[in-house]
Image: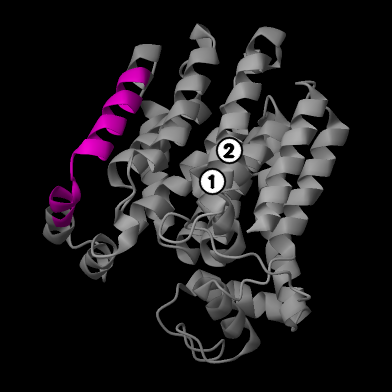
Amino acid sequence: MYVYIVIDFLLLLLYIKDNGRNSKKAFVVSAIILFLLVSLHDGQFTNDYQQYLNFFLGKNSMYGTINFPNNIENGYILFIRFLHVFVSSSLGYIFSISLLICIPFLYLVNKLSNNRILSILLLVTINDGLTLQTFFCAHRQMLAVSMLFCVIIVARKRVCCWKLIGLILVICAVLTHSTSYFVLFFLVLLYFIPFNNKKIYYILLGVSLVLGTFINLSDFFLNFISFFSIIDGAMRSVNHVLNSDHYSLGIWSFLPLTILGFSFVYYTSSYETNNFYLKSFVIGVVCKNLFGFFPLINRSIFFLILLGLIGAIPSSLKYNYSQRYIYALLVVLYIYFLNRMLQNPPENFMLPYNFIFD
């Protein structure tokens, strides 16, 4: 756990030293730190990581083998077979996956974030570290997320045939991980539904925090899932989570993200309230507050949270009057993060960090 604590502290110092200047040099340093953190992670304590690695190496896994796959999306199978043409070792796989996961995210942070170091710092700190952990072990989902990031990249650059390229990338993302369906559903809604008043954000964040903390929504959600039966094993997954210690999330799991959501909205200028990235972040936080106990929702809103970290940080945070507040907030978040990392499960959701060369 001390690796997470030290890295988070280094990024915090780097942010304070940069003093809101959003300098290129500081961003490069923080980007290298993130890439090394992802690529040097052993993952022996994460089941997904081991299953994907065994699948790539041709060993037996919960998804079968690379030659005889089962219960896994065809897009991921084709990707792994293509990757196998160029690399065959575990180190080659991990390095390649880390590049494909990190580069699109860091590219968008570089182009869109009003404070690039803060984007990376928050990635490591928020959500009890689970956002960062998804980079480590959820390779299939992260590949789909990276493809969706590439859709944003080609759309912004308006490259030749960008609509066709974007459509192909969306199809590839859906064929790589099923949560892409839900992500696309959220994105279409957010694109067409306007949020022109800050009060909408405040109400959504406040109500979701209260409901998620004091009202048990699990029965409603179980009935909803059983009625539609949209995903194989959904009921089994929900029951497993509701019967585990991890279901008792409590207000301390909701509060940091909610406070961050309130802060982003407060410091966003009135003419930027319909910012697509701000809407994505707030709706992600609201869904986390209401349905954070359900793995599918957690997986689906992950992309929305990342979008917020990329483009929702208000431009006004670079001014001195708001820097003092952000410094104080980051110190509080770090103390909270430190406290969670030093606790034992289920209070600490993070898995131990082992270097790949250990």
| Position of the C terminus by quadrant | bottom right
> Where residue 335 is drawn, which disc sits there?
2
At 65% from the left and 34% from the top, the residue drawn is 156
Q: Position of residue 155 (x, y in %)?
A: 61, 37
Q: Which residues are magenta?
A: 202-222
Name the residue: 30% across, 20% down: 203
Q: Is residue 173 above or below residue 200?
A: below
Residue 163 in sight in this render: no
Q: Residues within 10 Å of mark 2 (few under 14, many from 20)?
A: few
- Amino acid under label 1? Asn
* Left or right relative to 288: residue 24: right
Q: Are marks 2 and 1 in contact (CB under 8 Å)?
A: yes
Q: Tag 1's secondary structure?
A: helix
Which of the pair 11/72 is nearer the observer?
Answer: 11
Q: Is residue 208 magenta?
A: yes
Per the image, the residue denoted by label 1 is 339
**Residue appearing at x 16%, y 56% in the figure:** 222
Tell me the quarter of the picture where residue 70 sits. Answer: bottom left
For the stretch drawn in magenta, what is the main secondary structure? helix
Which residue is nearer to you in this view: 151 or 251?
Answer: 251
Picture layout, residue 98 above or below residue 163: below
Secondary structure beneath label 2? helix
Of the numbered discs in the image, which one, if any, rests on residue 161? none
Q: How many marks?
A: 2
Examine the rendered structure and indicate whether residue 13 appears above or below residue 20. Answer: below
Q: Amino acid at mark 2?
A: Ile
Gap in angstroms between the C-alphas marked 2 and 1: 6 Å
Q: Residue furthest right?
A: 25
